[in-house]
Image (spheres, rainbow, N blue to C red):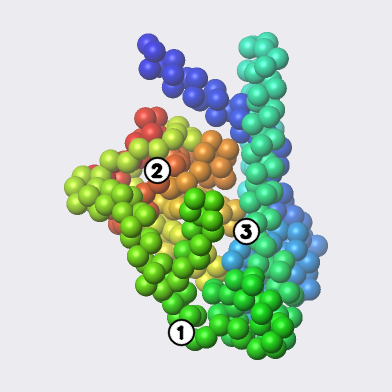
Amino acid sequence: MNEHKEKYSQKIFEILTTPNEFDEVNQELINWFEMLLENKRSNEKLFIKYLKKYPWLVAHTNNYNEIVKYYNNKFSITQKNIDIMFYEVKEMVGKKKCLGNIQKMLLARFDNNEAKHLSWLFQKFAVERMKLKGGWAGSDFLYLPLYLEILRRTKINPKDLYETYRINDVIDSIHSGGPALLKKEINNRKKAFVLWLKEGELYFYSGAKAEEVIKNELKGSAQDGESRSQKDVSLKGQVASKGKAVGRVRVAIPGNLSILKDIQTKFKEGEVLVTTMTQPNMVPIMKKAAAVVTDEGGLTSHAAIIAREFGIPCIVGTHISTKVLKNGDEVLVDANEGVVKKI
């Protein structure tokens, strides 16, 4: 009886904390559909203007030509399937309206001002967190003009600037008019680097020293992951969206457009998405997932909110799922109990 009550309470919680207003991801879908209706041909300037509004769509990507090519292709594909998009938008709007009505009914039944306030607060947190994450994830695109100016002044290799240079290195390079880092240090940082806050002091290490720090400081976590990978795996996390699902694992680490495109190509309907944390531009992948499992996140995380909207099981905060589970592993995701079991 208590178990049934607990599951019922969890479901009520999910309903009342899921936003009934459009978040950044919902609004982007609507705006893209509107853009397709208004424009029959792809337009580079149109894309750039659009991406300034939704920069998270091209998270971690600093290659302008790659961005334009990707969105030319996306425009062409979605323009041919605009009827499908119409029904996607219509379904999303209908679900939001239905959710709002259910929330009103539940809150009226409870007749509790604190419950109403907390429901509103959780929903606002989720929407604002999505905006925050969208701005952070899309910062590289917004900073692209700055990157190009730095490259012009310093002649630094674009890949090196993006992957290895710290702010003080960039400043030194601007002052000197050339690259501040030696090739050896660049290679060390590409191999490994650590920014470590120890006893109130901030330390930066690269290369062999960074690897040593990682090995010593993360020994417990690494050993835990290794020991679990050598036997039947059972991971625990926080329930974000209730339900059960069985499927093959697809590990997807968020990255730039090339990585995103590779994931989208390989991800199959009904697979279990296992990731460190989801990004807003991973929503099309989440739509095809039987369940979602993340290393990080909480009840108002992006993965949690999107999983509730899609009605798929989701467990967040497992810490080591991407280290333990491999592509092709068959797993049971029990998001009623917060457990992932390798079959």
Cα–Cα span, label 2 and label 3: 22 Å
Look at label 3 and name its amino acid. Ala
Q: Is residue 191 left or right of residue 299?
A: left
Pick whichever, 128 or 309, lies toward us: 128
Cα–Cα span, label 2 and label 1: 37 Å
Look at label 1 and name its amino acid. Lys
Work out whether 82 lies above or below 62.
above
Tag 1 or tag 3, which sits nearer the N-term? 3
Label at residue 137: 3
The percent coordinates of residue 222 (x first, y second) are 31, 54
Pick whichever, 137 or 83, lies toward us: 137
At x 75% / y 70%, what residue is drawn? 48
At x 64% / y 70%, what residue is drawn? 167
Query: Where on the picture, by quarter, is residue 116?
Result: top right
Q: Is residue 131 left or right of residue 6?
A: right
Pick whichever, 278 or 144, lies toward us: 144
The percent coordinates of residue 145 (x first, y second) are 74, 75
Q: Are marks 2 and 3 in contact (CB under 8 Å)?
A: no
Label at residue 184: 1
Q: Quarter holding the C terminus?
A: top left
Look at label 2 and name its amino acid. Thr
Work out whether 241 lies above or below 66.
above
Q: Secondary structure at mark 2?
A: loop
Label at residue 318: 2
Cα–Cα span, label 3 and label 1: 30 Å
Label at residue 105: none
Q: For mark 3, does the 10 Å Cα neighbourhood hold few (<14), some (14 to 19), or many (20 or more) residues?
A: many
